[in-house]
Amino acid sequence: MSEQKSTRSIPSASVYVDTTPFWDAARQGKLVLQFCKDTNQFQHYPRPVSIFTGSRNLEWREVSGRGVVYACTVIRVPGPGLDERLPLSVVTVELDEGVRILGNVVNVEADKVVIGQRVELAWDRLSDDVQYPSFRTV
């Protein structure tokens, strides 16, 4: 499946948590998540403090992008003029690093995605300079 530019809206960096490292890494094709240095555990979604300790002893670290489909659904939007890739498979992936992240599966038909499937990181290009993590089955 070839990479296409999406017509969907582009998320912006959070005003409560500096997510700049996430977006900078995504531009380089890397997935980074917050890591609690006190407990050696990743957390996602980004927060100002560790969910494990309440401390601010956090940093951004690259993750493998590999995991399993934890939950999935198919979005179907009727009507003309919408993104031609619909229906869209939206998944919660449990990454091998122990956190869950939302994304799309881009290399199979939406109805073919099942819980427990192994996936790896892919990228959904939202604009010329912004891409968002998505997944492909392996």
Image (tube, rainbow, N blue to C red):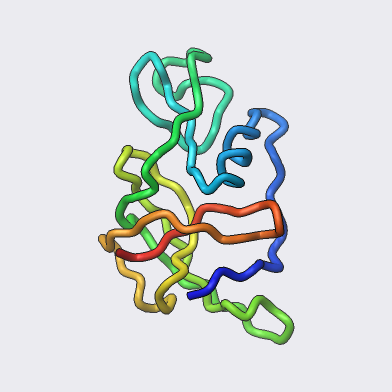
Which quadrant of the figure contains the C terminus?
bottom left
Q: Is residue 88 above or below residue 33?
A: below
Task: Tell me the residue at 61%/60% (across/down).
Answer: 125
Task: Tell me the residue at 51%/38% (across/down).
Answer: 45
Residue 118 is situated, as x and y percent measured from the top left of the image, at 28, 59
Task: Tell me the residue at 35%/77% (across/down).
Answer: 112
Residue 119 sits in quarter: bottom left
Looking at this rendering, what residue extends furthest in the front direction?
28
In the rendered structure, the answer to whether residue 9 lies left or right of residue 114 reads right
Number of numbered discs overlaid on the protein picture:
0
In the rendered structure, the answer to whether residue 96 lies left or right of residue 44 reads left
In the rendered structure, the answer to whether residue 123 lies left or right of residue 126 reads left
Looking at this rendering, what residue extends furthest in the left direction?
116
Q: Is residue 37 above or below residue 99?
A: above
Task: Tell me the residue at 65%/34% (across/down).
Answer: 20
Residue 36 sits in quarter: top left
Residue 64 is situated, as x and y percent measured from the top left of the image, at 36, 43
Q: Is residue 27 above or below residue 106?
A: above
Q: Is residue 38 above or below residue 42?
A: above
The front one of 51 and 119 is: 119
The front one of 136 and 46 is: 136
Residue 59 is situated, as x and y percent measured from the top left of the image, at 50, 22
Residue 121 is situated, as x and y percent measured from the top left of the image, at 42, 54
